[in-house]
Amino acid sequence: MTSKGTLSVAYIADPRLLAACDAVPVFRLRASLTHSLISAYDLLPKMSIVPSHPATEEDIRGFHSEEYVKLLQTGEPETEVEDEYGLGFDCPILPNLWDIVCRLAGGTLTAARELVEGRVKYAINWCGGWHHAQRDSASGFCYVNDIVLAIRLLRTKYEKVLYIDLDIHHGDGVENAYLFTPKVVTLSLHQLEPGYFPGSGPATETGVGKGRGYTFNVPYKSGINNKQFVHLFESILYNLCEVYLPHAVVCQCGADALAGDPLGNGNLTIEAYNTCIQHVLNLNKPTLFLGGGGYNKVNAAKLWTSITSTLLATSLAAEIPEHHFFPLYGPSFELEVTAGLRKSENTQTSINDTVKVTYDNIAKLAELLGKKTE
Ligand SMILES: [Zn+2]
């Protein structure tokens, strides 16, 4: 199953990791759909397929509090919800929850290890990207923050890590983990509107205390289209990296900004994501690619298969290949995700204003790092 050698992309997958991801009710089948589509497009032989090692309690304790970990280990399904720890509602205590979270976090740690040990340039865990999980509570379908755990591991080799969050929701769990420290730069692009989850992440939120200046928030309004999103991303990414000069990158590729997502209100197509991913690849740094939100599961599978092909510099046929889940791709049976007719609430002016505020924030970071900007 393992095919190493000169392959530059590690793909973390094994049946138990996929089953753990499929066990989270809101994402049921999504990991299997994604893996099957990647396989159907015959991308697996082009990658180093790495079986996932589950995380240990010690690994999870690298970020999460003792009390919260205990609850993940011992919480009984369908018992009293533990409000204080976020367990209930969108994060119910599931059967075998501890095993599930160890496998999900383990997938991302396995991917990070491939990078740290220098075996590949890029590593993928489409079962990762649980960006809302907080140190001592679950939130937004996320129980453990695999991203923070992986960044911790990456930093044993790569001092300066840039975290990029493309999910339509604010990457609040990762941001909070680094809000008070200059150790990591976080960059989250997300929809911010009254009542929209999680409600945080204005452009003016740039970190606290010693961490001030190292947090970047790029909010937008509903209905964002390809042109607006790509413009925001392109304008900011290169300028930020010229100042920060990251040694490694972690990119959360939440699929819920795609058109047709039942929880997102974005209007992106796969093309916009792939353009952004190409820019991330242009940075030419070891990079960890993770999944995230994506509640139209077929579209998430299409997106992550497409991003996998972008990492492999290969193109995919427009028609979905025949495979086990083929009937779910009807009626079009095409890889493309079409933009909807909805109007973007973002205007050229609002997008430009956001870019300007972000440029000011980048200039402040440059000052902190003792660098001059134009
Ligand atoms: Zn999301």
Image: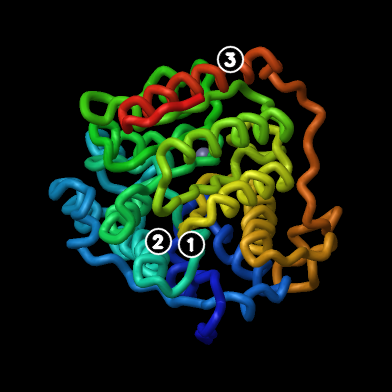
Give the residue number, with chain letter if any, for mark 3: 353
For numbered disc 3, what is the local secondary structure? helix
Nearer to us: label 3 or label 1: 3
Vertical comparison of 199 with 313: above or below: above
x 68%, y 67%: residue: 37
Please tell me which of labels 3 and 1 falls first in the chain. Answer: 1
The picture places residue 73, in percent across and down from the top left corner, at 22, 58
Amino acid type, callout 3: Asp
Horizontal side, residue 350 vs residue 253: left or right: right
The picture places residue 280, in percent across and down from the top left corner, at 56, 49
Vertical comparison of 2 with 92: above or below: below
Q: Quadrant of residue 322?
A: bottom right
Residue 24 in sight here: yes
Give the residue number, with chain letter if any, for mark 2: 108
In space, the residues marked 3 and 2 are separated at their CA atoms by 35 Å
Q: Residues within 10 Å of mark 1 (few under 14, many from 20)?
A: many
Vertical comparison of 177 with 113: above or below: above
In space, the residues marked 2 and 1 are separated at their CA atoms by 6 Å
Q: Say whether mark 3 is within 8 Å of ligand 1.
A: no
Contact flag, marks 2 and 1 (Cβ < 8 Å): yes
x 78%, y 56%: residue: 335
Please tell me which of labels 2 and 1 falls first in the chain. Answer: 2
The picture places residue 184, in percent across and down from the top left corner, at 33, 42
In space, the residues marked 3 and 1 are separated at their CA atoms by 34 Å
Give the residue number, with chain letter if any, for mark 1: 125
Horizontal side, residue 152 vs residue 276: left or right: left
x 60%, y 31%: residue: 235
For numbered disc 2, what is the local secondary structure? helix
